[in-house]
Image: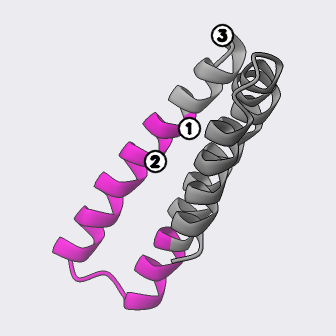
Amino acid sequence: MDHDSKADVLKRLSYIEGHISGIKRMVEEDTYCVDVLKQMYAVRRAVEKAESKILDGHLHHCVLEAVTEGRHAEVFDELVELYALKNR
């Protein structure tokens, strides 16, 4: 992962971590369910954005490098595995 992408992903993960702590507090304090769910949806979107950033970097760097080195089957298998995991 390039330096800028890594910094962005780490920033997003810190945000997610803080957000999760806030949601936990909300549940402990019996906050209205709809408000808790809205915050959980925000976390899900943040996780998806972090995933997208990592996948984009992987496709543009790691996959490109592997294909150039002739490791087509390995890369294809990894991408199929990721697709399967995403759609479970």
Mark 2 = which residue? 16
Residue 3 sits in which quadrant?
top right
Q: Position of residue 13 (x, y in %)?
A: 47, 38
Q: Residues within 10 Å of mark 3 (few under 14, many from 20)?
A: few
Vertical comparison of 33 with 28: above or below: below
Residue at image location 68% in from the left, 41% down from the top: 73
* Residue 52 spot, x, y in % from top left: 70, 47
Distance from Cα at disc 2 to Cα at disc 1: 6 Å
Does residue 27 show up magenta in the picture?
yes
Q: Nearer the viewer, residue 32 or 79?
A: 79
**Location of mark 3 (residue):** 3
Mark closest to the chain's N terminus, 1 or 3: 3
Is 76 covered by the magenta stretch? no
Q: Which amino acid is tagged 2? A: Ile
Which residues lie in the magenta part? 12-40
Where is residue 23? Give x, y as percent.
Answer: 34, 65
Q: Residue at x 37, y 88 (%)?
A: 32
Amino acid type at circle 3 is: His
The answer to the question of whether label 1 and label 3 lie on touching residues, with beta carbons closer than 8 A, is: no
Residues at discs 2 and 1 in contact (Cβ within 8 Å): yes
What residue does disc 1 label?
12
Q: Give how far across and how far down residue 82 sits, in percent.
A: 58, 56
Q: Residue at x 46, y 81 (%)?
A: 37
- SS at mark 1? helix
Total labels drawn: 3
